[in-house]
Amino acid sequence: QVQLVESGGGLVQPGGSLRLSCAASGSIFRINGMGWYRQAPGKQRELVAVITSGGSTNYAESVKGRFTISRVNAKNTVDLQMNSLKPEDTALYYCNLDDLKGNYWGQGTQVTVSS
């Protein structure tokens, strides 16, 4: 089994920054990619950003230019630097790991952007 542990969520004012981190451990075979998704109340879970094992990245249009995803392959960690946060970024943020043997999710970390 694979475990994903997220950290770094919290309450921040509009325009502020947060950094989310996710550490993967357990029976990791070969990672295709890791990423972050989010789900706001009453909405479907959506992609925020993903990064492949080769370093290619993909971002949701709504976060381009504000969020940056990065990964330390040797440590199986993925971070999400979030700048210029907006109230509409408020959501439960989930870490995802796509491995050749399965797809795994963390428990989620809450991000609230409010004055």
Image (cartoon, rainbow, N blue to C red):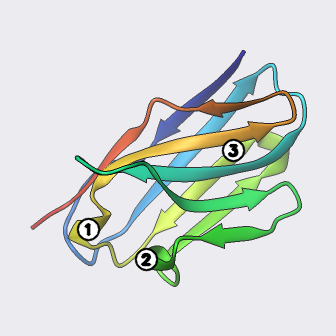
Instruction: Identify the residue under disc 3.
Output: 77
Position in image of residue 110 (x %, y %): 32, 44
Q: Residue flagged by tag 2: what amino acid is it?
A: Ser
Mark 3 vs mark 2: which is more N-terminal? 2
Using the numbered discs, state the Cα–Cα distance from disc 1 to disc 3 in whole angstroms. Answer: 26 Å
Q: Which residue in the protein does label 1 denote?
A: 88
**Dot 2: what SS?**
helix
- In percent of width and height, residue 34 lies at 70, 48
Label 1 residue SS: helix
Residue 30 numbered mark, or none: none
- Kind of residue at badge 3: Thr
Q: Residue furthest bottom?
A: 65
Q: Residue furthest top?
A: 1
Identity of the residue drawn at 36% across and 68% down: 17
Q: Residue at x 53, y 32 (%)?
A: 106
Name the residue at 46% across, 40% down: 7
Question: Could you classify mark 2 by the number of other residues whose Cα lies within 10 Å: few (under 14), some (14-19), or many (20 or more)?
Answer: few
| Quadrant housing the C terminus | bottom left
Which residue lies at the image location 46% right of the left edge and 58% below the top edge?
A: 19
Residue position for label 2: 62
Q: Are marks 1 and 2 in contact (CB under 8 Å)?
A: yes
* Category of crowding for the residue at label 3, using alpha-carbon neighbours closer than 10 angstroms: few (below 14), some (14–19), many (at least 20): many
Q: Please, what is the three-letter code of the amino acid marked with disc 1?
A: Glu
Graded by Cα atoms within 10 Å as few (under 14), some (14 to 19) or many (20 or more), the crowding at tag 1 reads: few
Query: Circle 3 — which element?
Result: strand
Q: CA distance from mark 1 to mark 2?
A: 10 Å
